[in-house]
Image (tube, rainbow, N blue to C red):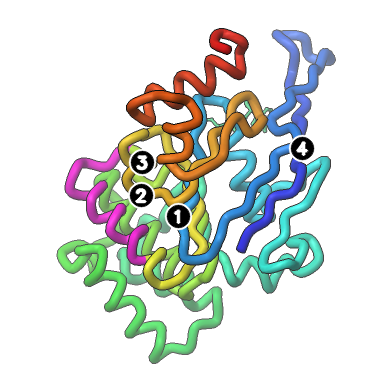
Amino acid sequence: MIEVVSIGKRFRARDGRWIRRWREVTALHEVSFTAQPGQITGLLGPNGAGKTTLLRIIAGVLQADQGQILVDGVAIQQDLLRLRSAMGVLGDAKGLYQRLTARENIRYFGQLHGVPAKLLAQRIDQLIDQLGMAGIADRPTAGFSQGERMKTAIARILVHDPRIVLLDEPTNGLDILATRSMRDVIRGLKAAGKTVLFSSHVMQEVGELCDEVVIVNRGTVAAVGSPQAILAQSGQASLEDAFVHVLGSAEGLFT
Ligand SMILES: Nc1ncnc2c1ncn2[C@@H]1O[C@H](COP(=O)(O)OP(=O)(O)OP(=O)(O)O)[C@@H](O)[C@H]1O
């Protein structure tokens, strides 16, 4: 389980063209929610809402200014190395080693996580099969399409069988078939009891996949609940309308 407790994060950004003028950007303010094991939790929010910043803080690669992240009751900063090995994180940068084949990329990550060789070979075969990568597994990744790169990146972060999976826009840029197989992978993670937290702009995807949705707007939580509960609370017929309504209410456009 992931507990996000009152997280706040500010960045210092250069103000205009002035070299010595800085201003504070509040990326997150008092963000709290819980992501449960065996459930898919979706982070939904417009551009710049704070989704990537939040996922990076949960992954332990960025430090919050306020609040804390608890993974199974343990604060991540207290036991960062152990908790990181329990996580699979698909960040916004999905760079692969171009001279290595897809299989070698995946194997390298497994070795970094200390997966024993025999188990690693089995696990790689299983992921290649599950993600439909048989035709590309032994090609160097240079020249891979967006979807092929994404599949390799996802296999790489799942190779050590993490119990917590964080995915930043996992279907971004994928065609319909690759999107479907990615959604199947996400459902498979849920069925295996993993805690899955992913960010998305795609309403249909969030509505179909998520048990719980966290709508983030301008760094704060604007609504939390199941897709059905969010529809009921907003009185809207579709999640897209509910999303627009929730954001509009937060901006004072609706009451
Ligand atoms: N390193 C940084 N320096 C300055 N500002 C930053 C930095 N990282 C993020 N921000 C700011 O924090 C806010 C949240 O950014 P973030 O990338 O988390 O949003 P997001 O919801 O993931 O957006 P998108 O959907 O467009 O990817 C934005 O205003 C962004 O400009």
Label 1 beta carbon less than 8 Å to ligand 1: no
CA–CA distance in space, label 3 to label 1: 11 Å
Which residue is denoted by mark 3 in the rendering?
A: 207
Magenta region includes residue 1: no
Which residue is denoted by mark 2 in the rendering?
A: 209
First in sequence: mark 4 or mark 1?
4
Q: Quadrant of residue 106?
A: bottom left
CA–CA distance in space, label 4 to label 1: 23 Å
In the image shown, does 181 or 127 lie closer to the viewer?
A: 181
- Count of labels shown? 4
First in sequence: mark 3 or mark 1?
1
Disc 2 packing (10 Å; few <14; some 14–19; many ≥20): many
Task: Confirm or deny contact between disc 2 and disc 1 (CB under 8 A).
Answer: yes
Task: Confirm or deny contact between disc 3 and disc 2 (CB under 8 A).
Answer: yes
In the image shown, does 198 or 150 lie closer to the viewer?
A: 198
Nearer to us of marks 4 and 3 is 3
Which residue is denoted by mark 4 in the rendering?
A: 8
Q: Which numbered disc covers residue 4?
A: none
- Start-end of magenta stretch: 173-188
Look at the numbered disc 3 and give the secondary structure of its residue.
helix
Q: Is residue 212 above or below residue 120?
A: above
Q: Quarter holding the C terminus? A: top right
Q: Quadrant of residue 74?
A: bottom right
Q: Is residue 61 above or below residue 217?
A: below
